[in-house]
Image (spheres, rainbow, N blue to C red):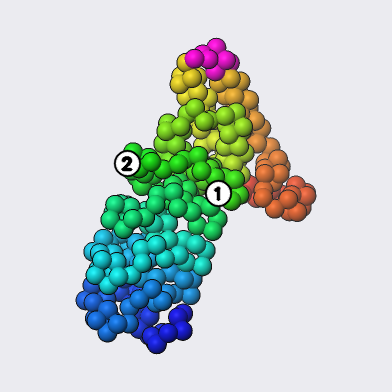
Amino acid sequence: MPSVSVSSKVVQKALTAAKCGDLKVLETIGKARSLHDSVVDDYGASCVHYGARSNNVAVLELLVCRLGLSASKRTCVGATPLHDAAASGSLHTLRWLLGEAGAQVDEEDDFGLTAVHLAAKYGHSYVLNWLLEETCCDIMKRSTSGALPLHFAVVGGCLQAVKLLIKEAPRFLSIYLVFFIYLSISGSLSIYLSIYLSIYLSIYLSIYLSRVLYLSIYLSIYLSIYLSIYNCVLLINPYILPTYLKHKNDCARREKTSPSLIYLTKM
């Protein structure tokens, strides 16, 4: 909470008003000169962040245009209101921030994530589709961990987001990426979705990469057979599944005990 002359009660009231779209309360606090960029929650999120999450353009117009709050203030993890809009699937406020508030589509938080990463991660395919069609966003930008938006879409389990990203930049899709997608899926999605997506990627490659048709057809057949068989092995023998868990220390114990089929139960 801020250390300025604004009580915690006023701070909470302002943040709640921004979240709920109560313009009258925000105007009242603003007239009392108690609403500024130092009014934040415990994570450094301001009223503009809350307004961006609520998908309420009127709140942003009041806070930014009339009361002079910053549309680029960052939280304790470096997230701007644009990041929050993308992560919450708030397309209206995201468009306003980019078009009226001067936000940059490829601005990164402390983890190197952009609006595209976050829209893909949380499965907001309509936000992702708008970003791809209406902006010059960089879908090949990597996070600090080296992950592309496509990686986040796969781990997040949004097939539509995966399709959008593959369609946008098929030339950048490498063999390494295909196998990375497979490994990511096997650790976070169901077996059946993994088989479907692996076959989809293979066929898509063979159709799109017409310049190397024979090579791509061979590759597609190989990938389809290999990944499908491998997934079937995982399906039949659940004792192999623990090897794909992130925490390697638990693998040995999971292999010895009766498997809980953690992935199969989430289908």
Which residue is drawn at the image coordinates 46% and 71% (left, top)?
A: 44
Which residue is drawn at the image coordinates 59% and 51% (left, top)?
A: 144
Instruction: Name the secondary structure under disc 1.
Output: loop
The foreground one among 225 and 54 is: 54
Residue 202 among magenta residues: no
Reading the image, the residue beneath label 2 is 134
Reading the image, the residue beneath label 1 is 143
Q: Tell me if residue 148 can be seen.
A: yes
Q: Amino acid at mark 2?
A: Glu
Q: Quadrant of residue 23?
A: bottom left
Give the side of residue 28 with respect to residue 197, left or right.
Answer: left
Which residue is drawn at the image coordinates 54% and 58% (left, top)?
A: 110
The foreground one among 83 and 188 is: 83
Q: Amino acid at mark 1?
A: Ser
Q: Please name the predominant secondary structure of the magenta segment in the image.
A: helix
Residue 214 among magenta residues: yes
Q: In the rendering, at what x and y percent does residue 17 appear?
A: 30, 74
Q: In the rendering, at what x and y percent does residue 141 appear?
A: 51, 43
Give the side of residue 250 with respect to residue 134, left or right.
Answer: right
- Up-down relation of residue 200 to residue 154 (above or below): above
Q: In the rendering, at what x and y percent does residue 82 appear?
A: 39, 57
Labels 1 and 2: the sequence-earlier one: 2
Q: Quadrant of residue 168?
A: top left
- Up-down relation of residue 42 to residue 177 (above or below): below
Q: What is the magenta range?
A: 211-218
